[in-house]
Image (cartoon, rainbow, N blue to C red):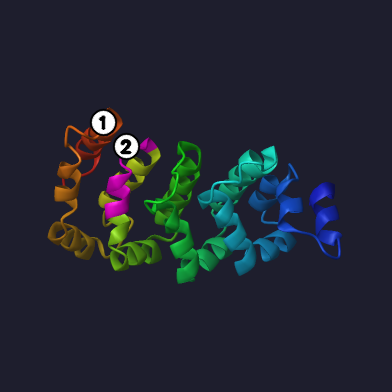
Amino acid sequence: MTPLVEAVLDKENFTLEELLDEEEIIQECKALNSRLINFLRDRAQVEQLLRYIVEEPPEDAENKRTFKFPFIACEIFTCEIDVILKTLVEEEELMNLLFSFLEPNRPHSAFLAGYFSKVVVCLMIRKTVPLMNYVQAHQDVFRQLVDLIGITSIMEVLVRLVGADDHVYPNFIDVMQWLAESNLLEMIVDKLNPTCPPEVHAGIYCSLKSGFKKL
């Protein structure tokens, strides 16, 4: 354990922010530091990590709240530590919080969209079944992804979800049947409307070229 992270963990009342401020935290996560992971796997900490990723910081926020903490939060999730990901996928409220980033009233900065997308892709790789089960149970997720198809990282998530195959998802046939019965392709084609900006049309082209052949 690095001395600085250890010093924070040894405090009687330390905060998540104190840990996120330590440069060695990702190194310690990758080293599977048990004290650190036992703290980070707690529901309250997972929730706060998600909030750094999906919620825009206040305008008067410090630089570390605006840039450092969202970056570190994303890196913690993408370290693919099973118990941390397990806390997330087994709690529907936390999954709702993650996917709340897609809601139409959000700013959807490309900066945070990239972090959101990395976390979702991580779940798709490491927690495929619960992620796909969640998406199937919340059909608005695909509609919201299509609405944001002009953001490259969001488009990539959509392509990966539609492109899931039986190598990563045992219920592949069920998902393909469900997608075929949905109006996903129609939603995408609707975005070819001339009133939509060029980046949306570009996202649709890339999506159709990359992963929507199954539809």
Badge 1 crowding class, 10 Å Cα cut-off, few under 14, some 14 to 19, many 20 or more, is some
Foreground of the two, 173 or 19: 19
CA gap, disc 2 and disc 1: 7 Å
- Secondary structure, mark 2, is loop
What residue is shown with label 2?
A: 150
Q: As drawn, is 116 to the left or to the right of 201?
A: right
Please identify the quarter of the rendering in which residue 202 is found: top left
- Taking 67 as reference, is 163 above or below it? below
Rendered location of residue 60, percent (x, y): 66, 41
Residue for point 44% across, 49% down = 106
Rendered location of residue 54, percent (x, y): 51, 51
Badge 2 crowding class, 10 Å Cα cut-off, few under 14, some 14 to 19, many 20 or more, is many
Rendered location of residue 42, percent (x, y): 64, 68
Three-letter code for the amino acid on which mark 1 is drawn: Ala
Q: Could you tell me if residue 42 is visible in this image?
A: no
- Taking 45 as reference, is 109 above or below it? above
Three-letter code for the amino acid on which mark 2 is drawn: Gly
What residue is shown with label 1?
A: 202
Please identify the quarter of the rendering in which residue 138 is found: bottom left
Q: Are marks 2 and 1 in contact (CB under 8 Å)?
A: yes
Q: As drawn, is 111 to the left or to the right of 205?
A: right
Residue for point 27% across, 47% down = 146
The span picked out in magenta is: 143-152
